[in-house]
Amino acid sequence: MEKKNLDWANLSFAYMKTDKRFVANFKGGAWDEGVLTDDDRVIITECAGVLQYSQSCFEGLKAYTTEDGHIVCFRPDLNAERMERSCLRLEMPVFPKERFIEAVVQTVYANRAWVPPYGSGATLYIRPYMFASSAVIGVKPADEYQFRILVTPVGPYFKGGVKPITIRVSDFDRAAPHGTGNIKAGLNYAMSLHPIMDAHRQGYAENLYLDPATRTNVEETGGANFIFITKDGKLVTPRSDSILPSITRRSLIHVAQHYLNMTVEERAVPLTEVASFAEVGLCGTAAVISPVGKIVNHGEEICVPSGMDAMGPVLTKLYDTLTGIQMGRIEAPEGWIKNIA
Ligand code: PLP
Ligand code: COI
């Protein structure tokens, strides 16, 4: 199939309408079989649960063109499992894992002309999401839901690609203790919009959120988990019940241990420890690994030794290995790559 005529190398992280999207409806206690459709519009009642009480959740994963020309996606089973946890926490019906994976495959296949070519630096972002579609006015879960998958070709999440960014320690929290920080609820992102706009107005690319219970440990940013490299080459990453369990982070832990022979520590990371690290990165599907060059804590600047010019050497090795696995240059662990075409 002929590829779309896009300037692949210069895409930003933005929505572009593609040809097909997957839609399934939950009604009368069951999911219908779902369809691929050209229609990008959603028609719901003015009183839909998603509009009144934000009952919605979503996922994010990517499809890649491999070096040998196949189209694949990365660990969709883990997105299905995480969405199941989001749905249970939000009293929404689960879209079964095998059907989730099949719907991802079908949607990407139907839009294969939009999957950026190998080597272009772009990827196809896949956004599965679910929302309450029937009316509620008392505070309660809706009876009907819609599950959809849209895809859109994207470039780097942060302007400048893999150039180090400057972030700030936020006075806002992204999650409550025992709240919804560990699921991918739309409401977590709604409440991050003011902090992120405020950060941008002050010249920062993102917010570093602290743990909401004690405000002493590093949690994550609005859209990515942290990974730190110690001066002796260990990977340290925050463990907390209120951060989103990133699939990229979990994959990088495996890559560090089994491909790069590194020691990994998953534990609380006090903000006071951050100045001691050699490299700092943000990791996620959208962010991949984005290096952090500077962290500003209320006027105090923490300058990461790897600097503002380029990603440090250990993060670069992790980045090259992970993207090598995703794009078929390096053999993947069993079950990580789902072949689509
Ligand atoms: N943390 C938050 C708050 C996110 O929105 C994301 C993006 O999905 C991540 C972390 C990274 O998770 P993943 O690697 O599964 O994309
Ligand atoms: C992702 O990485 O898939 C996300 O959902 C993060 C979002 C901020 C774009």
Image (cartoon, rainbow, N blue to C red):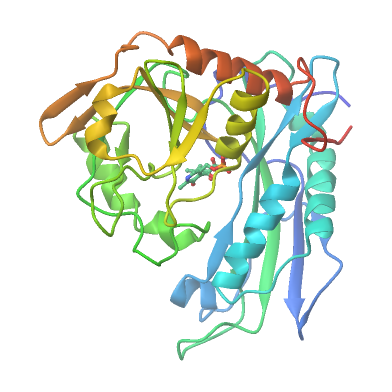
> In the displayed structure, would residue 101 be above or below residue 62?
below
The residue lying toward the viewer, choosing from 197 and 177, is 177
Residue 41 in view in this figure? no
Q: Quadrant of the C terminus?
A: top right
Judge from the rendering whether residue 38 lies leftward or rightward of residue 194; answer left or right: right
Looking at the image, the residue that sits furthest to the left is 299
> Can residue 74 be seen by looking at this rendering?
yes
Residue 232: image location, x then y, percent: 41, 15
Location of residue 259 by image quarter: top right
Instruction: Determine the image quadrant of residue 89.
Output: bottom right
Left or right of 325 in this view: 232: left
Which residue lies at the image location 28% right of the left edge and 54% below the top edge?
A: 173
Percent across and percent down for residue 317 are 56, 13
At x 69%, y 48%, the residue is 78
Q: Could you tell me which residue is drawn at 74 percent across and 19 percent down? A: 117
Q: Does residue 118 lie above or below 298 as drawn?
A: above
